[in-house]
Amino acid sequence: EALLLVFVLDLFIMALAALLQAKKASLRPTETIVRTLPVCQTGLESEGLHCLGGDIEPEHSEDEHATKEAASKCAEALRRAKHAVVYTGAGISTSTGISDYRGPNGVWTSLATGRIPDDSFDWTAATPSYAHMCIAKLMQIGYVKFCTSTNLDGLHYKSGLTPLENLAELHGNKFCERCPDCNAEFLRPFPIRRTATRATGRSCDCGGSLTDSGIDFGQALPIRHLRLAEQHAKLSDFSLVVGSSMRVRPASDLPVCGEHVAADGVDARGKARLCIVNRMDTGLDARASIRSYGDADLFFLHLMQELELEADEPPDFSHLHDAMQMKRLASRFLAPSSGHYIGSEEKERRMAEALTQLEAEILAESAAAQRL
């Protein structure tokens, strides 16, 4: 009887296993979809409002006909200009997925409304927008002589412009580290991490400690970039402002500091040879001879059509690693997990050490390749 019971039990187990296997085969793959919700926290409002200057301001819009008309006028101004300069702010990059500061979901507006800004997007992986590539083409053809930007995202660099040649980056570049002693700059193939001391752990040829190139409130602007921007602003006879509310000096003065743009000077009120493309009001709206509240990419679409030009595809920048790629590559320098719990601060410390090793390896390989 015992043998019979064991036999029956084996048959039952085999039948159950067959049923489970058949059920498994009939299941379809599932996909987990995560929909993020705003993360709210009290006490953020005062900081956000301070950065905004005290008020949350609305964005405006216009119909496409108005945008096209403004683009047509801008095209004519570019044809007449001998030294046009473009000034860009955060608004030119929002179509790439990067948040601005003052828009409805901007960093400062989020803080002012008690929301923690969404940082889930790895903006170091962003690709230049259509507007970025149009500016690069206009510069290549000769309609634009120079670009001054207050963006840290490096998208003008990725579009093919060269910092300190035809591009001034007043608020830094995420892929650039700078020496505070001699002002030398080094473009790297990876994002420069911001540390508590701002030092990257690498040294300049002069012996100074390199830092990231980002600029915060109260910091002096990088002198080489500022001088170059001022030089071209004074030579300019037409200014095109894109995606900037022009609220922070001295950058906000540059579009009207050239005598051929604004004959009556920076602090005057007369009309200037100035085109502004921005969804929010700016401090220079009254002086603009051309004003558009349209989308930046749409404005440039009509501008390029008027000039009978086509923007190029973004150049190959696959040599630039984004932040997520760097973490994946750096994981091989991490010690194997022992199975014990590791706190978030310790994980961040270990990853920082691994990234430092990876950065040193990348730079050593790059230096060796240059010597060949």
Image (cartoon, rainbow, N blue to C red):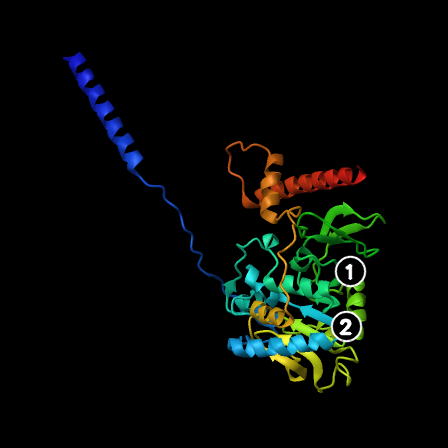
From the top left corner, tell me how far across and down residue 31 is, in percent: 39, 46
Image quadrant of residue 220? bottom right
Earlier in the chain: of badge 1 and badge 2, it is 2
Residue at 64% x, 64% y: name it. Answer: 134
Q: Which callout, 1 or 2, points to the residue nearer the camera?
A: 2
Q: Which residue is mark 1?
A: 164
Residue at 77% x, 83% y: name it. Answer: 265
Q: Which mark is residue 83?
A: 2
How many numbered marks have been drawn onto this rendered protein structure?
2
Q: CA distance from mark 1 to mark 2?
A: 17 Å
176, above or below 344, in the image:
below
Q: Is residue 98 visible?
A: no
Residue at 54% x, 33% y: name it. Answer: 337
Label 2: how many Cα within 10 Å (few below 14, some 14–19, many 20+): many
162, above or below 358, in the image:
below
Residue at 51% x, 38% y: name it. Answer: 341
Would residue 262 appear left or right of 349 to someone viewing this image?
Answer: right
Kindly state the secondary structure of the residue where label 1 is placed: loop
Kindly state the secondary structure of the residue where label 2 is placed: loop
Q: Nearer the viewer, residue 171 or 93?
A: 93
Q: Is residue 367 visible?
A: yes
Label 1: how many Cα within 10 Å (few below 14, some 14–19, many 20+): some
Q: Quadrant of the N terminus?
A: top left
Q: Quadrant of the C terminus?
A: top right
Q: Please, what is the three-letter code of the amino acid marked with disc 2?
A: His
Q: Please, what is the three-letter code of the amino acid marked with disc 1?
A: Leu
From the top left corner, tell me how far across and down residue 20 is, in percent: 27, 31
